[in-house]
């Protein structure tokens, strides 16, 4: 079924505790994916949902999960699998918001890169909801520090990305271990062949929810492209920030070296910038992301590892310092801006002919208008005629 608009939360038959948590977030009307998924998941039905990034998927499955949790039962009742530690951390934070007024509902976040002993201590508090990356959950199950035989709901968030990253065997093994579940939710920006394979094997009579990226759901993002030399990228970012006054910016690079370089050059220009990539310790990565979420960091530079892992509603501008290799990565990168009904801006910097060919292909395949811009003789930004 295709959904183009949400409904009021108070029409969904939710408990007073959940309604209080929703009101605490100043929400009244659900997004289309929430309107489509909450009723069938509340009825313990399997769900397969295709929805663009940034459309409120965590609340779509998080609300039914928290509603179903029995606080008196200390066994694990729900498992949510996510492809990256950043997304797992973000999901756990949102679940705690949803459960804020339901005493006794506990959740835990399990991911690689954090000492397993610390996670084992948290598991001793008997959480009913486990949010995890597939590899780390498998580790805990081998150690018998997590029991999943009583799990009722399983959700795969960003299922397409999780399976693309090579987690298919971990995911299927975990689903086989949770065979007594009542329902399985698959949430994905794209329904790939691998996602369909999981659906065919592990779901029965699933409610299919598709949220079109129509004008209502599509973020309002002005997209620009600018030809620069390789060494000018940080200078161009600094000039654009100076002219626009934007103070909440994300910059994406294809390589770890590029993130380090861009960050260093921005810092040399007196701009408050920090970066994360795969070689930076997890604790440091979390500190940088928390700083950005709190509004204490002007430019957050990253490889694609964080493109889906950070959820901030008010990013002013996204810079693509390198043109991404995958069209979907472009969509996810620019999707960090233009959220919560605000207009966003995305600027892609093009330093060579292959990058120019790639951005042309992205514009065509994703049906986005990416307008060329340059600095005029007075140093002001202008669209190319």
Image (cartoon, grey):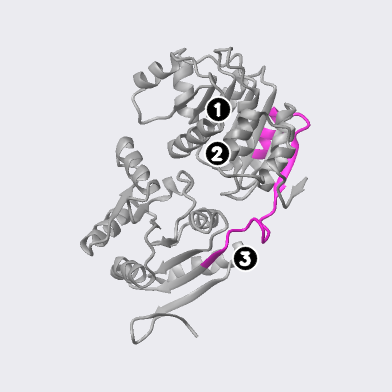
* On screen, residue 39 above or below 268: above
- Specify start and end residues of the magenta stretch as a single range: 195-222
Residue 159: in sight, yes or no? no
Q: Secondary structure at mark 3?
A: loop
Give me the residue at 74% from left, 39% from top: 11
Q: What residue sits right under mark 1 in the picture? A: 101
In the rendered image, the residue lying farthest to the left is 268
Please say if the residues under marks 1 and 2 sit with CB atoms less than 8 Å apart: yes
Which residue position holds label 2?
24
> Which residue is pictured at 62% across the width and 65% down the height?
367
In the displayed structure, 268 sits above or below 131; it is below
| Mark earlier in primary sequence (2, 3) | 2
Report the front residue among 28 and 294: 28
Taking the spot 41% from the left edge, 69% from the top edge, the residue there is 350
Asked if 191 appears above or below 135 in the picture, the reply is below
Q: CA distance from mark 1 to mark 2?
A: 10 Å
Q: Which residue is mark 3?
A: 367
Residue 375 falls left or right of residue 61: left
Residue 342, percent across and down?
Answer: 54, 60
């Amino acid at each position: 079924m295709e959904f183009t608009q949400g409904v009021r939360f108070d029409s969904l038959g939710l408990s007073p505790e959940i309604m209080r948590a929703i009101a605490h977030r100043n929400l009244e009307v659900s997004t289309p994916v929430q309107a489509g998924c909450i009723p069938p998941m509340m009825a313990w039905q399997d769900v397969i949902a295709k929805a663009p990034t940034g459309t409120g998927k965590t609340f779509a499955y998080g609300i039914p999960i928290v509603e179903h949790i029995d606080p008196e039962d200390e066994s694990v009742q729900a498992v949510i699998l996510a492809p990256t530690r950043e997304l797992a951390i973000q999901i756990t934070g949102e679940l705690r918001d949803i459960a804020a007024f339901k005493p006794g509902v506990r959740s835990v976040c399990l991911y690689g890169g954090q000492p397993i002993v610390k996670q084992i201590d948290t598991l001793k508090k008997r959480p009913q909801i486990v949010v995890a990356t597939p590899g780390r959950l498998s580790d805990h199950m081998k150690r018998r520090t997590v029991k999943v035989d009583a799990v009722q709901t399983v959700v795969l968030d960003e299922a397409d990305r999780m399976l693309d990253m090579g987690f298919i065997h971990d995911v299927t093994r975990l689903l086989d271990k949770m065979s007594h579940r009542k329902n399985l939710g698959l949430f994905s920006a794209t329904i790939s062949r691998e996602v369909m394979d999981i659906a065919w094997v592990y779901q029965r009579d699933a409610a299919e929810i598709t949220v079109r990226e129509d004008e209502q759901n599509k973020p309002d993002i002005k997209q620009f492209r600018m030809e620069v030399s390789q060494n000018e990228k940080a200078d161009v970012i600094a000039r654009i920030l100076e002219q626009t006054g934007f103070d909440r910016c994300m910059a994406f690079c294809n390589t770890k070296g590029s993130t380090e370089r861009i960050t260093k050059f921005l810092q040399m220009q007196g701009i408050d910038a920090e970066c994360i990539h795969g070689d930076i310790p997890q604790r440091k990565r979390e500190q940088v992301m928390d700083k950005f979420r709190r509004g204490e960091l002007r430019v957050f530079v990253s490889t694609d590892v964080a493109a889906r892992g950070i959820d901030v509603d008010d990013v002013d501008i996204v810079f693509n310092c390198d043109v991404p290799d995958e069209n979907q990565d472009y969509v996810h990168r620019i999707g960090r801006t233009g959220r919560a009904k605000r207009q966003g801006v995305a600027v892609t910097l093009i330093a060579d002919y292959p990058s120019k060919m790639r951005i042309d292909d992205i514009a065509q395949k994703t049906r986005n208008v990416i307008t060329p811009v340059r600095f005029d003789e007075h140093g002001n930004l202008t669209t190319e005629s």
